[in-house]
Image: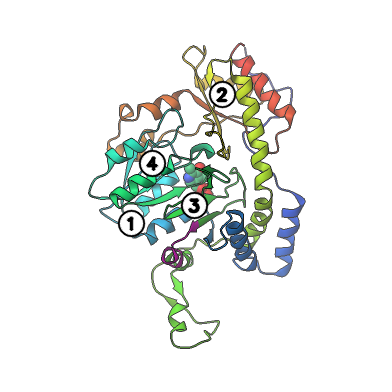
Amino acid sequence: MTAAAPLLPFLPFAAPEIGDEEIAEVVDTLKTGWVTTGPKARRFEADFAAFLGEPSLHCIAVNSATAGLHLALEALGIGPGDEVITTTHTFTATAEVVRYLGADVKLVDIDPATLNIDPALVERAITPATKAIIPVHYGGLAADMPALLAIARRHGLKVVEDAAHALPTTSAGRLVGTLDSDATVFSFYANKTITTGEGGMLVTRDAALAQRAKVMRLHGMSRDAFDRFTATVPSWYYEVIAPGFKYNLTDIAAALGIHQLKKAERFQQRRAAIAERYAEAFAALPLTPAPMAPAGERHAWHLYPVQLADDAGLSRERFIEKLFELGIGCSVHYIPLHQQPYWRDRYALKAEDFPHSQRAYERMASLPIYSRMSDADVERVIAGVRAVLGA
Ligand SMILES: *Cc1c(COP(=O)(O)O)cnc(C)c1O
């Protein structure tokens, strides 16, 4: 059979939901003439702390989650000779920031039931050089934070959560962003649970970490030194205390974030409803549905990864191809880092050392799950999956 043109318009794998409120706020920003970091970025930071329910949290808006992870690790003093442990089953940004600082990455396998980093393997990977752990809340399901935080406490390690998928997600009833880690970083990339086009938020309770990250976010410029000598700092005065970065979020992007954040709950409820419908519809099919959150916990449902069973009758490649022929976009999250040339070669990694991630990768496909999907779109995905599996 040749690939026929889909009968319906293509259903993309992901699409943001941008409303008139976001558009009006961006227009307002443009009209004020203040287009880079300013009052709207500050408002977005304050709104974010309020959203997490802890107004005293330090929320630092940045132009990507990658930037936020880099700033957090830099502020924690991670550097050459240090090791940082994270999951192989993630996007390369989680690990690359460790290399920016000249430190090394120790990748570990996942728990196949949750697809999140396995705390027992984290503990086994610790060496005298280990300084930090970066858990990823894969797909929006919280990693086992009580276990990871206990390991970190026992071994004196820092914890920086990669919460790129986890707005809003809970662990033991608390929102990710308010747990007892050193810092948490959210992403507002185009396909994330809320978006500013490009953007991120570094969240911490640690005042010193926040202070350092704010300075390094903008070229290592500080106005604090002046404060010691006089009550009023002239607006033009600053001191460069380090070779910092250019990681600030623009007010144009923050304008989007302010209104996306107000909709974050509704977006999550819609994605959770889609996930529930998928789970029910896929129960009798030869595939493993996406892992659910424990009772009472919230799952942000950034991703809906299914894994084909051995008797599914077709490869994951064919599964994605056939859904594409039906006009349905899918993706794969992720090609594990141990398979990527840079990471594989630098650390001489072998697939056998990551059996759960490897097995999940070989049979997984992420289905569309986003608030703009109509009920008909959801049923179309279900019908497509059924048809492709010959059910
Ligand atoms: C998207 C993503 C990032 C990077 O986010 P950016 O905002 O694009 O820098 C980091 N980690 C994970 C797991 C992601 O999915």
- Classify 122 as above or below 287: below
Q: State the SS at label 2.
A: helix
Q: CA distance from mark 2 to mark 3?
A: 31 Å
Mark 1 vs mark 4: which is more N-terminal? 1
The amino acid pointed to by label 1 is: Ile
The magenta segment is: 203-211
Q: CA distance from mark 1 to mark 3?
A: 16 Å
Q: Is residue 103 left or right of residue 171?
A: left
Mark 2 vs mark 3: which is more N-terminal? 3
Residue at x 50% of width, y 57% of height: 203
Q: Is residue 351 magenta?
A: no
Asked if the residue at label 4 sits under 8 Å from ligand 1, the reply is no
Residue 89 percent across, percent down from the top left: 42, 35
Residue 124 percent across, percent down from the top left: 27, 38
Residue at x 33% of width, y 45% of height: 151
Image depth: mark 3 or mark 4 in front = 4
Query: Are dots 2 and 3 in contact, CB under 8 Å?
Result: no
The amino acid pointed to by label 4 is: Ala
Asked if the residue at label 1 sits under 8 Å from ligand 1, the reply is no
Q: State the SS at label 4.
A: helix
Residue 5 percent across, percent down from the top left: 69, 22
Residue pointed to by mark 3: 185
Query: Are dots 4 and 2 in contact, CB under 8 Å?
Result: no
The amino acid pointed to by label 3 is: Val
Instruction: Say the numbered circle drawn on residue 147.
Output: 4
Instruction: Say the numbered circle drawn on residue 320.
Output: 2
Residue pointed to by mark 1: 78
Residue at x 71% of width, y 28% of height: 377
Q: State the SS at label 3.
A: strand
